Image (tube, rainbow, N blue to C red):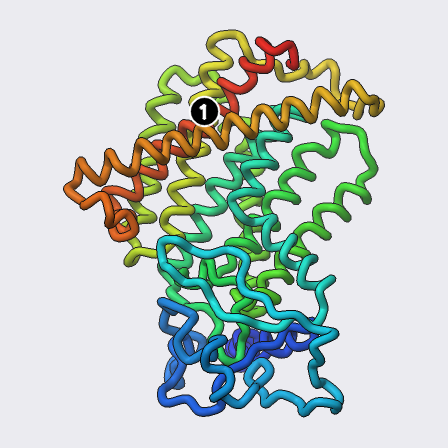
Amino acid sequence: MADVVVKRFVQMCNYLQDPRHVARFQHLCGVRGTFPEKRTKPDRGSPDSDRPGLRRRNQSSDEGVGSGAGEDAAVQQVNGLQGAEPGKPGALSEGTSSRAKPLRRNSLTGDVGQEFLIHNKILFYLFTFGTELGNEMFFIIFFPFLLWNIDALVSRRLIVVWAWNLFVGQSTKDMVRWSRPASPPVVKVEVFYNTEYSMPSTHAMTGTAIPFCLFMLTYGRWQYPFLLGFSVALSWSVLVCVSRVYMGMHSILEVITGFLYSLLVLAFFCPLLHKIDSYYMMGQYSPLVVLVSHVSLGLVAFSLDSWSTSRGDTAQALGTAAGAALASHMNYQLGLLQDPPLSSLPLTLPALSAGLVLRSLLRFLIGVAVLLLTRMMMKAVTIPFLCRLFGFPADEVRQARQQMRVELPYRYIVYSVVGFSCVFFVPQLFIIFNLA
């Protein structure tokens, strides 16, 4: 009986891992790719017949995929299936479709992707927004806005969950070592993370952990209907998860695994968040513990596998969390912490007014401008310094950043300063400008 259950479970996993399901979903959503009909060698990233589900990691999405220059010599195919003839059902017309390329280019891999056709622009923009909810720029906007304008305590604790969630997810990727879905048949609408492993989906993990943790931290602390908070969290999570399949970055199995995996991370960390946050602020040796623990986790992440962009993302999250924790400690020690007292709970949203909106907008714009300027200045100083320190030529930055001794300290230094500025320096600017 147990053998039958295990066999069926494995069969179901192999079924959900099949890239053809991703291609069918993309086709249903109006994404079309043009691939050459004849292939001289197997796709990289295709499943090994002897080991279902285990795939080699892609290094570029261009090979074996028709580009604009070669389309005339190739037979048009739609998501791996030969394209419909003009005038027949399923055919594309110039009036209803538009050519597009991946919006984000990865400067470290040089992968710019391939052109594809978008038949449903509404879904394209919707899922592009959904996938951005798991990218760096969103967190540069989201965490500071929450910290400066709504609830600093909730923002601090969310950053802890975000960093640990990314560390666990990215480290698991480097241990499982499954590559992205094969292309063809999948169309790579996004290529920025194409060289990373894909099991589990860390976008699905952060896209689940952040909204549900936000819901758990704010419900009861703020007054709002339970159904409203749960619906927003669930919608946020579903949008991010489905967008990863739409982008061609993950199989259905990888997204489901990421969703469930993040729930396990939440179940472990949520009961500990109060103790972690309190220790960061009040612990005598918390600065030392924060630095040693976060650097150690980064070293672990960097030692699991060969270079990929996931290592930098992990170090970036850990560095941001370390900087925020150090700033929280300093705020508490200097008496600058402004968390509302327990007697004032539950909190209520203030009535919207022009003055409130204007002050919130000014805080956000000034603060984000300071963070972006800080990041730009730190990058401009740190990368050349580390290249010179470790003997890398100034014109080989891409190769240098694929080395742990450059990438790890670069990410830690830059983003720990950004995190520290967000939690400590920028709020002091608000006091100076009378915007606190």
Secondary structure state at the residue bearing disc 1: helix
Percent across and percent down for residue 276 are 49, 28
Residue type (three-letter) at the residue carrying disc 1: Phe
* Front-most of residues 237 and 356: 356
Q: Residue at x 66, y 70 (%)?
A: 98
Horizontally, residue 344 falls left or right of residue 15, namely right
Percent across and percent down for residue 288 are 33, 23
Figure check: 338 above or below 82: above
Horizontally, residue 89 falls left or right of residue 281, namely right
Instruction: Please give the residue where the numbered disc 1 appears in the rendered image.
Output: 420
For the C terminus, the image quarter is: top right
What is the quadrant of residue 350 in the picture? top right
Percent across and percent down for residue 189 are 55, 66
One can see residue 1 in this view? no
Figure check: 307 above or below 248: above
Figure check: 22 above or below 275: below
One can see residue 132 in this view? yes
Q: Residue at x 60, y 55 (%)?
A: 131
